[in-house]
Image: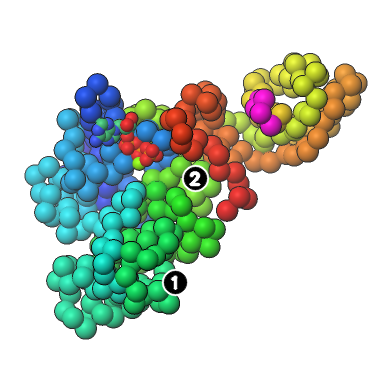
Amino acid sequence: MTRQHEAQAAIRAVGLTKRFGTRQALAGVDLEAPAGTVLGVLGPNGAGKTTTVRILSTLLRPDAGRAWVAGRNVASDPHGVRERLGLSGQYAAVDEKLTGRENLYLVARLYGMPRRAARRRAAELLADFRLQEAADRPSGTFSGGMRRRLDLAGALVAKPPVVVLDEPTTGLDPRGRTDTWGAVRELVAAGTTVLLTTQYLEEADQLADSIAVIDRGRVIARGSAGALKARVGGERLALTLPDPGSRARALGILAGLGPHTPDFDPRTGRCTVATDDGVRALEHALALLRLADVAVEEVSLAPPTLDDVFLALTGGDRARRAEPGRRGPVSHRRGAA
Ligand SMILES: Nc1ncnc2c1ncn2[C@@H]1O[C@H](COP(=O)(O)OP(=O)(O)OP(=O)(O)O)[C@@H](O)[C@H]1O
Ligand SMILES: [Mg+2]
């Protein structure tokens, strides 16, 4: 790779590996985000998202591999990287004794802003993240979502050219999520490069110019949302089969419709199958199911979501993916936000 190429990509990682004890957290991750774009790193719990973020933001050294942020090497020029990178970690880091305004003012001063500019920037960000009302009470009294927003605001104080957001909307209510999306879009419009990790497929679909899907420390797919969707075939025919007695018959019929294997969730009775024939496939399927006396509820035909892409890429085994006691990667449904 040429020097020029390295400089053009605002974020670039090559062959990152990291092991914790016996656990291989990263097994060779390559990433690249051209300047002024959003790279979405999508993956379930334990995939290696935070480990990647910590390496890019110089908080952790990789065992092998190299990375650059805004043209600076994370290993040989960590100071240069930190000057050019705003980070909002997975767990909000705010000083609970300070008010929201003081937290932001302090960050601005640490970045070397003069007092007046620091005050102005803090006020701007408090407004952007709807924190004005609570601005002057200790952030220890903030709700989880408010802390999260304050931490995000902190990452943006110095208007760095590269911003890394680790699960920026986890734990936010729908309004908080929309605000955050708006903030990311504004950043990008102003030329900032953003890397964001998410378990919300909808979020990557909404924001990211390109997406890297990671699973168990490896990038298993990359491309635009559209390109990823194209990989799993055309539209998705979804239907709910309320009667357990006829499900096996129904799945046999649906499997016979085309080359794609139906995905079935026994908990909900919902069956999804990719189809390249759209409405014709839908009509055909319903006719065959009626002949076979199979009860059907809630029929729909829709373009594939990133949920579908993820299921197709990872083999569709939901139960295997979720770490005990944690939210699974595909619990978020389009329209739930
Ligand atoms: N400091 C550590 N010590 C030991 N194991 C770790 C450490 N940090 C991460 N791991 C392990 O490395 C793997 C990747 O973790 P990482 O935090 O990068 O995942 P993630 O994609 O951010 O997951 P989540 O969505 O839950 O935040 C996991 O199996 C995790 O348990
Ligand atoms: Mg994480």
Image quadrant of ligand 2 equals top left
Residue 219 in picture, x, y percent from top left? 37, 31
- Give the quarter of the figure containing the N terminus: top left
Q: Is ligand 2 less than 8 Å from the beta carbon at label 1?
A: no
Q: Which residue is mark 2?
A: 200
Question: In percent of the image, x 46 and y 34: which residue is there?
Answer: 325
In this image, 269 relative to 318: left or right? right
Range shown magenta: 264-268
Residue 246 belongs to the span the image colors magenta: no
Type of amino acid at the residue the image marks with label 1: Arg
* 242 relative to 122 in the view: left or right: right
**From the viewer's perspective, is 188 left or right of 319?**
left
Image quadrant assignment for residue 309 = top right
Number of the label disc, if any, that sits on residue 130: 1
**8 sits left or right of 183 in the view:** left
The answer to whether 148 is drawn above or below residue 310 in the figure is below
Indicate the secondary structure of the residue bearing disc 2: loop
* In the foreground, 71 or 60: 60
**Outermost residue, bottom direction?**
116
